[in-house]
Amino acid sequence: MTRSDLVEELANRFDQLTHRDAEYAAKTILDAVSDALVRGHRIEIRGFGSFSVNRRPPRMGRNPRSGESVAIPEKRVPHFKPGKALREAVDAHTQMLTTQAKEKISRS
C-alpha cells in the first residue's frame, strides 16, 4: 500500500472527508510519526505495533571493489515491531492461503 492508496482508502471509508482532507490527515499522521522518531521517541499503536529507533554500533566493513577496510560509523535506524493482533491476523491469512494452495494442488 502506498501513501496515495492510504489516502484513497480514507476518502472511501469516510464520506465526510474530501480527498484533500484525507490527504491532509494522512500527511499529518505520518509527519507526527516521523518527527517523534527523529526526536528518539517510541510510538506505540495498540493492536498494530510500535515504532522505535535502534542504534547500530560502529563497525569495520570492506570495500567490495578494492577489499580495503572501511570504518562504518554508528547509525540510528527506525525499527517497527508488529503487535500481537497484527501478527496473528497476518499469520491466520497466511495459513488460509497455504491451505487453499494445498487443496488446489491435491485437486489437480
Image: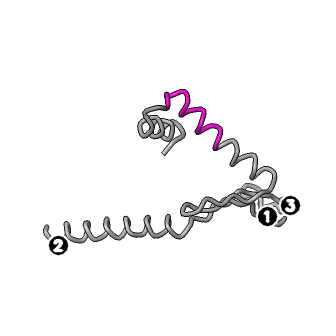
The CA distance from mark 3 to mark 2 is: 54 Å
Which circle, 1 or 3, is nearer the viewer? 1
Q: Secondary structure at mark 1?
A: strand
Tell me residue 98's x, y (percent): 31, 69
Q: In the image, which residues are magenta?
A: 17-29
Residue where numbered disc 1 is placed: 55
The CA distance from mark 1 to mark 3 is: 16 Å
Image quarter (top left, top right, bottom left or bottom right) of the C terminus: bottom left
Q: What residue do we see at 69% from left, 58% from top?
A: 43
The circle on residue 106 is: 2
Magenta residue check for 11:
no
Q: Earlier in the sequence, mark 1 or mark 3?
A: 1
Q: Earlier in the sequence, mark 2 or mark 1?
A: 1
The CA distance from mark 2 to mark 1 is: 48 Å
Crowding at label 2, few (<14), some or many (≥20) Cα neighbours within 10 Å?
A: few
**9 vs 56, nearest the viewer:** 9
Identified by mark 3, the residue type is Ala
Q: What residue do we see at 37% from left, 64% from top?
A: 93
Residue where numbered disc 3 is placed: 71
Tell me residue 23's x, y (percent): 56, 32
